Image: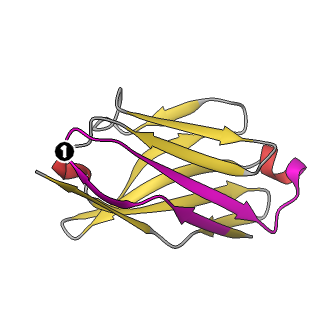
Amino acid sequence: VQLQASGGGLVQAGGSLKLSCGVSGMILSTFRSTDFAWYRQTPEKQRELVADSSRDGSTNYGDSVKGRFTITRDNTKKRVSLQMNSLKTEDTGVYYCYARGPYIDSWGAGTLVTVSS
């Protein structure tokens, strides 16, 4: 299983970015049975959960991003996205896509998000 994250970049505070995680090496039925999440890491903090999307359709968000970020999954295109609005400087970090499911525990390479003031 490979997870390919994209969409990071430099944005001003208050702006928006959309991250995308493309999943390969996984058939559709397995994708639908897999939980996905976005984590982020900064030099100052341990890797923290940003948002997750469970196989049952439920979502969960870190307290710092609630109301600003939205995680979605496309079960036909095998893609998980993270829409980030009203970005703050403290959202700066490397964002990682993560998959957990039957016999799956995979991290993608991160994508850097930099929010300038």
Q: Is residue 94 magenta?
A: no
Q: Is residue 22 magenta?
A: yes
Q: Residue 106's image quarter? A: bottom right
Residue at 37% x, 39% y is: 62
Q: Is residue 58 visible in this depiction of the protein?
A: yes
Relative to 49, 79 lies left or right: right
- In this rendering, the answer to whether 101 lies above or below 63 is below
Q: Residue 114's image quarter? A: bottom left
Q: Is residue 54 visible in this depiction of the protein?
A: no
Relative to 21, 102 lies left or right: right
Q: How many marks?
A: 1
Residue segment shown in magenta: 3-29
- In this rendering, the answer to whether 76 lies above or below 96 is above
Identify the residue position indicated by label 1 in the image.
13
Which amino acid type corresponds to the residue marked 1 in the rendered image? Ala
Residue at 66% x, 65% y is: 105
Secondary structure under tag 1 reads loop
Q: Nearer the viewer, residue 32 or 15?
A: 15
Rendering coords of residue 67 (x, y %): 35, 26
Rendering coords of residue 73 (x, y %): 66, 41
Residue at 66% x, 56% y is: 100
Residue at 27% x, 41% y is: 15
Q: Could you classify mark 1 by the number of other residues whose Cα lies within 10 Å: few (under 14), some (14-19), or many (20 or more)?
A: some
Which part of the image, by quadrant, shows the N terminus? bottom right
Rendering coords of residue 108 (x, y %): 57, 69
Question: From this viewpoint, which residue is outermost toward the top?
Answer: 67
Q: Nearer the viewer, residue 28 or 101?
A: 28
Q: Nearer the viewer, residue 6 or 54?
A: 6
